[in-house]
């Protein structure tokens, strides 16, 4: 594939990702493995792309779920890391170590974009009051375009300057440093795990956490099998508790049917 | 004041699609997702309110602060549309009340299901497969996202037909559902600690002729995955009791890894 076409497709992917994740997930969202797969197809090396993306995916687990706090943009980090890994031949550790900071810096753009869109929100409402209803809708679409810039700008910069910079870096960094980054790559998924444990009822369901650990650490069961066992447990829990609930409801005086005007 | 007009099935769907494909875009700090709500409602409300003044008043309602898990927004907008269609501008206050009172509880459910549980379970499976160069997990995930479109449509219809009543009758069931799926999620998290988090030390003690590898000779004997478990507990504690930000923890881990690599205390985990 000609480089120019490749670059255009990567920038379009960045724009798609902004729309996709902003609207709550339509096709790929901003998950490293799904974005990484597309990147791999564009770059013509799905194997490398999936390994880099898989590493980032495991790092991002749980971290991506939380709005508001400053966590790196893992989807963007995936585009950058995969691009650099394939175009410069950097190893996974190095590619991720360059991609992750770019993902962190992008957060600043996110802030700026949300600030700019404040202006468009007001503009749109002003058009409403001036009875310019078509313009009202167009000013919203303008804000969507601004929204996509938060991913398009960093990706465009990386495509333009990235490979040459990374090649220079690769020549100067010592062995212990790349080793250290690879070690960090192995440890970083713990951040996501920690976040997940914070967000889930970990204390209440500690049993399930331990069971999952034992199945995996001692019995080496594959993750899909453990997920299925978890689904069985979840189904059982749901059924028993709904049964309890309906017993409680029939016992008490039920007045849920009164509702209000907007029932139907 | 003119009577509100009913929307056709096609017009309703057009309004739904507008929200599904733009929810959360145009996000701003002041009113958050409100511009998307206004955009979604713009055409449908024009049909309901042919009178300019009513239209402007009704639209103003939707420029007010709105923030919810995009998928769950479907339920609220469905209910809102039904109310406006039925009572027109008289529903003005009720619409706003409905929106503000449902945002919180529905987001609570939506965030945990759509942003935490689903990505955790699918992410660990797909991520794990990807590490072996296998795209199937990622492809399944993409297929599930595409299929979610129909779930979102269904949530709209649910909101439109059942409105407020939905929350009172289904509310407790939804909580139980979230809770039960959390158990599944935690089982996967337990697996992740053992498989995905990798900490390894190449240190060896040499006393006379006896060599003892710290990793295989001591740590692995106590419990497989002892170091990852310790690290997970540390991070859990830093996030909670110390309220560190994830970024700070990421930097800490990178610094520890670099120091560990330089001194030889930490090493790259050998592949089995």
Image (cartoon, coloured by chain):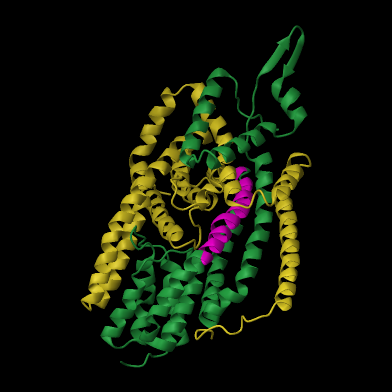
Chain colours: A yellow, B green
Q: Is residue B25 left or right of residue A179?
A: left
- Count of numbered circles in the view: 0
The residue stretch that appears in magenta: B105-131
Give residue A182's quadrant in the image: top right
Q: In this view of the protein, which residue sits in the foreground, A26 or B72?
A: B72
Q: Is residue B130 left or right of residue B249?
A: right
Q: Examine the structure image and report whether residue B116 is included in the region drawn in magenta.
A: yes
Q: Examine the structure image and report whether residue A182 is included in the region drawn in magenta.
A: no
Residue B163 vs A55, above or below: the answer is: below
Which quarter of the rendered picture does the C terminus of chain B lie within? top right
Question: x, y (%) of residue A27?
Answer: 50, 61
Q: In this view of the protein, which residue sits in the foreground, B149 or A201?
A: A201
Q: Residue at x 50, y 36 (%)?
A: B249
Q: Residue at x 51, y 73 (%)?
A: B75
Question: x, y (%) of residue B162?
Answer: 55, 81
**Residue at the left extreme, as displayed:** A130
Question: x, y (%) of residue A184?
Answer: 54, 32
């Amino acid at each position: 594939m000609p480089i120019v076409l490749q670059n255009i497709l990567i920038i379009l992917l960045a724009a798609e990702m902004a729309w996709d994740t902003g609207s709550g997930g339509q096709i790929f969202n901003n998950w490293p493995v799904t974005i990484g797969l597309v990147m791999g197809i564009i770059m013509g090396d799905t194997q490398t792309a999936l390994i880099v993306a898989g590493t980032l995916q495991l790092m991002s687990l749980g971290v991506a779920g939380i709005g508001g706090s400053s966590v790196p943009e893992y989807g963007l980090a995936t585009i950058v890391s995969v691009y650099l890994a394939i175009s410069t031949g950097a190893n996974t550790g190095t590619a991720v170590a360059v991609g992750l900071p770019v993902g962190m810096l992008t957060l600043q753009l996110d802030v700026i974009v949300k600030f700019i869109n404040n202006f468009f929100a007001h503009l749109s409402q002003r058009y409403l009051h001036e009875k310019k209803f078509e313009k009202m809708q167009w000013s919203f679409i303008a804000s969507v375009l601004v929204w996509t810039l938060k991913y398009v700008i960093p990706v465009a910069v990386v495509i333009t300057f990235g490979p040459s910079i990374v090649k220079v870096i690769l020549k100067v960094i010592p062995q212990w440093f790349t080793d250290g980054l690879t070690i960090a790559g192995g440890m970083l998924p713990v951040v996501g795990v920690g976040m997940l444990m914070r967000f889930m009822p970990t204390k209440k369901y500690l049993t399930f956490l331990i069971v999952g650990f034992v199945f995996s650490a001692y019995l080496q069961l594959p993750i899909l099998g453990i997920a299925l066992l978890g689904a069985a447990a979840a189904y059982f829990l749901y059924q028993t508790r709904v049964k309890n609930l309906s017993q409680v409801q029939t016992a008490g005086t039920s007045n849920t049917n009164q509702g209000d005007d907007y029932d139907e | 004041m003119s009577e509100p007009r009913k929307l056709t099935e096609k017009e309703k769907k057009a309004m739904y699609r507008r929200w599904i494909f733009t929810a959360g875009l145009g996000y701003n700090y002041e009113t958050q997702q409100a511009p998307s709500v206004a955009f979604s409602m713009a055409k449908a409300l024009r049909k309901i309110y042919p009178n300019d003044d009513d239209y402007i008043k009704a639209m103003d309602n939707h420029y007010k602060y709105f923030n919810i898990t995009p998928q769950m927004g479907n339920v609220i907008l469905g209910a809102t549309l039904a109310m406006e269609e039925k009572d027109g501008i008289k529903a003005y206050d009720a619409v706003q009340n409905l929106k503000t009172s449902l945002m919180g509880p529905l987001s609570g459910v939506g965030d945990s299901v759509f942003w935490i549980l689903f990505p955790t379970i699918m992410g660990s499976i797909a991520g794990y497969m990807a590490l072996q160069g296998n795209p199937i997990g990622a492809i399944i995930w993409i297929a599930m996202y595409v299929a979610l479109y129909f779930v979102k449509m269904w949530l709209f219809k649910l909101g439109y037909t059942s409105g407020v009543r939905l929350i009172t009758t289904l509310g407790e069931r939804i909580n139980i559902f979230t809770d039960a799926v959390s158990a599944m999620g935690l089982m996967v998290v337990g697996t992740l600690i053992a498989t995905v988090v990798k900490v390894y030390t190449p240190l060896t003690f040499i006393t006379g002729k006896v060599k003892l590898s710290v990793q295989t000779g001591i740590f692995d004997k106590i419990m497989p995955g002892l170091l990852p478990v310790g690290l997970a507990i540390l991070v859990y504690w830093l996030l909670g009791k110390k309220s560190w930000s994830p970024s700070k923890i990421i930097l800490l881990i990178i610094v520890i890894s670099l120091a560990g690599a330089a001194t030889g205390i930490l090493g790259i985990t050998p592949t089995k």
